[in-house]
Image (tube, rainbow, N blue to C red):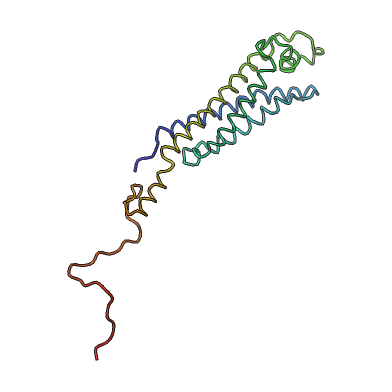
């Protein structure tokens, strides 16, 4: 029997790989910054810690659901949860710099300051020379992409369930109604044997003749 929803399964694997890549990139970049912040003896930003947690969960979930099996489509509530988590992460990070991005005060006093290890040179307020600007923009971009991929996985899960998820239940109802189950390639295990032509039906008389 051909695989149900072959295109959906292929797209699911593609999206899971995208989620895995996004989680790894964001975790690597922000984890690197937090390591530098710890090296400087400063306090980590709570928004960055939250994003690291979301990225870590993304890696775990994407590895668990990467196989194109039915359970990965039934995980659409988790996809919706992760979409909301990444949406929150993107909003929290984007509002740190706003439209100024690498020209913002937070960038100069935190991200660029620690990324370029300017704490070895002087206190906050020195010119960081756009240190780590590309890394910050990359983290923002992959945070947005991760949010989008989880939204796509959620929609794909709903589509697959509506198109294929109820087929087995429908087949069982057909069996109960006496209709052949289209999901089975062979008849049920127990099938009544047909009566031979001319054979009488009814109870067998086992009483011995007198």
Q: Toward which corner of the image does residue 99 lie, by quadrant? A: top right
Q: Is residue 145 above or below residue 78?
A: above
Q: Is 170 on the left or on the right of 44, as rendered?
A: left
> Furthest-front residue in view?
177
Q: Is residue 40 above or below residue 59?
A: above
- The quarter holding residue 93 reads top right
Q: Is residue 171 left or right of residue 109?
A: left
Q: Residue at x 49, y 38 (%)?
A: 73
Place of residue 155 in the rendered image (x, y in percent of width and height, measured from the top left): 49, 31
Instruction: Give the left or right position of residue 62, taking residue 50 as reference.
Output: left
| Image coords of residue 70 (percent x, y) | 47, 41
Quadrant housing the C terminus: bottom left
Figure quadrant of residue 49:
top right
Q: How many marks?
A: 0
How far from the left and from the top, in percent, is residue 43?
Answer: 79, 24
Work out whether residue 129 or residue 92 is closer to the camera in this orientation and state it.
92
Q: Nearer the viewer, residue 10 or 95?
A: 95
The one nearer the camera, 86 or 200, is 200
Residue most extreme to the left: 198
Q: Quadrant of the N terminus?
A: top left
Q: Is residue 27 above or below residue 99?
A: below
Residue beneath the point at 73% across and 15% down: 106
Horizontal and vertical percent for residue 96?
A: 70, 17
Q: Residue furthest bottom?
A: 210
């Amino acid at each position: 029997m051909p695989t149900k929803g072959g295109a959906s399964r292929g797209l699911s694997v593609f999206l899971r790989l995208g989620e895995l890549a996004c989680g790894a990139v964001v975790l690597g970049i922000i984890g690197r910054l937090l390591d530098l912040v710890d090296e400087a003896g400063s306090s980590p930003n709570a928004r960055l810690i939250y994003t690291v947690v979301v990225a870590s969960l993304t890696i775990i979930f994407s590895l668990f659901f990467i196989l194109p099996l039915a359970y990965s489509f039934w995980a659409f509530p988790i996809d919706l949860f992760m979409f909301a988590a990444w949406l929150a992460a993107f909003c929290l990070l984007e509002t740190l710099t706003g439209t100024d991005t690498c020209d913002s005060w937070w960038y100069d006093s935190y991200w660029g300051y620690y990324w370029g290890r300017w704490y070895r040179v002087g206190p906050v307020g020195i010119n960081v020379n756009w240190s780590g600007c590309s890394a910050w923009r990359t983290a923002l971009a992959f945070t947005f992409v991760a949010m989008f991929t989880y939204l796509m996985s959620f929609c794909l899960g709903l589509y697959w369930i509506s198109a294929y998820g109820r087929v087995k239940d429908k087949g069982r109802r057909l069996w109960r109604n006496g209709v052949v189950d289209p999901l089975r390639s062979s008849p049920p295990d127990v099938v009544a044997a047909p009566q031979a032509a001319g054979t009488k039906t009814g109870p067998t008389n086992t009483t011995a003749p007198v």
